[in-house]
Amino acid sequence: MPVSIHDKKYMLKLLGFKVSDEELVRNIENMGPNVKRIDAKEIEVEYPANRPDLISTLGLSRAVRYYMRKSRSFAYKIKQGEALTISVGSHVAVRPYIAALVVDKMQLGEDDLLDMINFTEKLSSTYGRQRGRIALGLHDMREVKGPLLYDAFEDEEFIPLGSKSKMRYSTVMDSDKRGRKYIGLCRSGGRYVALKDQKGTMSLIPVINSERTRVSAGTKRMLVDITGTTREVIERVADLLAADFMDRGFEVSRVSIRYRESSRSLPKMETRRFSIPLKQIDDELGVTVGFNNAIVLANKMGHEAALIGKKIAVSAAPYRLDIINEQDVIEDIAVGYGYDYIQPVPVPSSAIGRVEARSEANNSAREIMIGLGFGEAMNSYLTNEETNFAKMRHARETEYIDIVNPRSGMATMLRTWILPSLLRQLGQSMHDSFPLRIFELDMVFGIRRNVPAETYHLAAVSCHSQANFNEAKASLEGLLRGIGVACKFAEGRDESMIEGRCATVESDGKIIGFLGEIHPEVLTSFGIEEPTVGFEIDLNGWIGAESADSV
């Protein structure tokens, strides 16, 4: 799990009350994080990956105040009107979304500034997945002249942070280690993603800001930009940041984001509301909580709660990005109650289990792939149309299972194949050593005779400078030989593969899969910088005695 190191003196100042080291550690760990070290100067805390609001010292202090019942302030008031406009151009495709907020009436101490900078850097690298999912920028507004433009531009000049002379985008990308690291996240169709005002470049995203908008302890008015690949994610992060700034006593204003097809006024400061029957809470926790206690426990976790009829009405704060549905609220109530006080109940069973034939066959295939030098990946069944179809150069299929009222733009459908998941994982691993070889054996989903259907697939990719068709063919032949399946190859075509370097795989007269060299446009869309080959095969019906064809 991610780790943050907090200045102990600064944290005690933010808490606003005296507390012993022992009591502080106990309350932090009761909330879920793990205190790895505490001494006279620092507190090192390992926090859950789904709680980015605990990264900053202010965020952790806020949670401790609620947990120790030293705070009951739940409302966040944002300034009316929009302080600035950002237009989104037509060329920015690699990270097409932006959110922003303006912070006024700032009075920064050195501790505040350091905590803010550490927070944004840690948030970008952990929750933001090394700036691939989100990236943040802080700008002093004194030298900013609106309106702003977010787009991908030709190779232009600006003065990067820490420099005294102008440099071209391309020079920064080649000379700066961060530029080389994030080059796949910055270039879009031969252009460079940047944020500009009427005076010029403010930031080469997600690499470096300009010296002109450097933030310091003297900053009184600040612009925060958040860019990324998913609109809902960056907009919820904007809510988190706005709450943090308001908790510091600053004033936050909205920014108008103008896309070609629509406009957004951000941050939204969305409060998620739930109405949960007390009986459901009691049944799921296995203890009798009681109405009053349920409200107190929800308050301890930072939620506003009230009794309405026989239900607990809970409002989750905008900074709680992990709260998606009522189950998350019930889990928080369990944390507030204390897992040590919930006694486990044994579940009696007289059934005798066995490993089904499908699992045995799948395990054999996994062992063979590992023996061929591939590491196993485990990805989510949930994906979205952009990843499953558009980035793979496939037209959107009509027969797939979509999700009604999805909570996130990252999860709008069930995947129809595995290769996009593996390529997305490769794109996030470009900082690792090559060669990169991974595989996954799991279910994909479709619709068969108007009924949802599950099918087991095995897919694999190999990424390195010498990757070619013959490598993919040899790996697939080794797998099929190991599991005793006769096959033959024929020339094939798939939009995700390079034409002429793709083949189909046939067994018993049926096409069971395909292999080939991944098309350069697909590699670019996932941020992959080296040649990559891959294959995907359907395992149902010809491996294992049992098949899971339908739900």
Image (tube, rainbow, N blue to C red):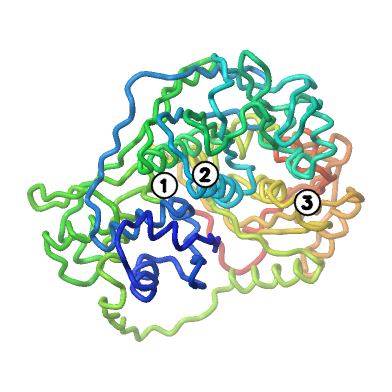
Residue 322 placement (x, y as % from top left): 41, 51
**The C terminus is located in which quarter?**
bottom left
Kindly identify the residue that appears in the image at 46 percent across and 18 percent down. Answer: 263
Q: From what the image shows, is residue 337 above or below residue 169?
A: below
Which kind of residue does numbered mark 3 sit on? Glu
Residue 272 placement (x, y as % from top left): 30, 41
Residue bearing the label numbered 2: 113
Nearer to us: label 1 or label 2: 2
**The N terminus is located in which quarter?**
bottom right
Can residue 400 be seen here? The reply is yes
User: How far is the residue under mark 1 from the one under mark 3?
Assistant: 46 Å
Residue 428 placement (x, y as % from top left): 68, 49
Which kind of residue does numbered mark 2 sit on? Leu
Residue bearing the label numbered 3: 506
Kindly identify the residue that appears in the image at 38 percent across and 60 percent down. Answer: 12
Residue bearing the label numbered 1: 321
Q: From what the image shows, is residue 466 above or below residue 19?
A: above
User: How far is the residue under mark 1 from the one under mark 2?
Assistant: 23 Å
Within 10 angstroms of label 1, few (less than 14), some, or many (20 or more) residues?
Answer: some
